[in-house]
Image: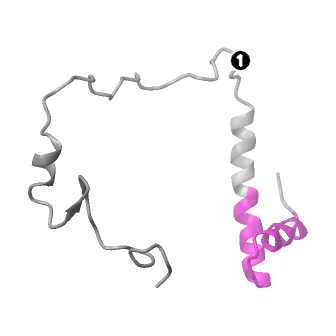
Amino acid sequence: MSLSLEDVRHVATLARLGMNEDELTNMQQQLSSILGHIEVLNELDTDAISPTAQVIALTNVMRADEVVERFDQETALANAPQHRHGFFSVPAVMGNDEGGSA
């Protein structure tokens, strides 16, 4: 399949690409080549292949959900530079502590 120069110019406009005539001609050749390769792939008979075929076996990478002993809130907050009301206290990223803007 061969794209016209106008097709390439239209696509370049849609993609907001500023291209000169040499670049458009080069892109026309490259895109036409790519579409030619896709046409060859479209000729393959894939009726016997299921749409969800995998070339490698899938395995579950999730670890088992096991209950383990964790430390309590006091231990978690013991080394925190600042904590307040049982939570880590960090400097405000936006605004001040009262919720207003900086």
Vertical order, 13 against 78 (above or below): below
Range of the magenta residues? Answer: 4-32
Q: Main secondary structure of the magenta part?
A: helix
Q: Quadrant of residue 52?
A: top right
Q: Tag 1, which secondary structure?
A: loop
Camera-side residue: 41 or 50? Answer: 50
Residue at 69% from the left image edge and 37% from the top image edge: 41
Q: Which residue is mark 1?
A: 47
Residue at 16% across, 27% down: 68
- Residue nearest the observer in this picture, 52 or 77: 77
Check residue 7 for magenta coloring: yes
Q: Residue at x 27, y 24 (%)?
A: 65
Residue at 90% across, 70% down:
6
- In the image, residue 4 sits, relative to residue 68, either above or below, namely below
Tell me if residue 28 is in the magenta stretch: yes
- Residue 59 place in picture, x, y as percent: 36, 23
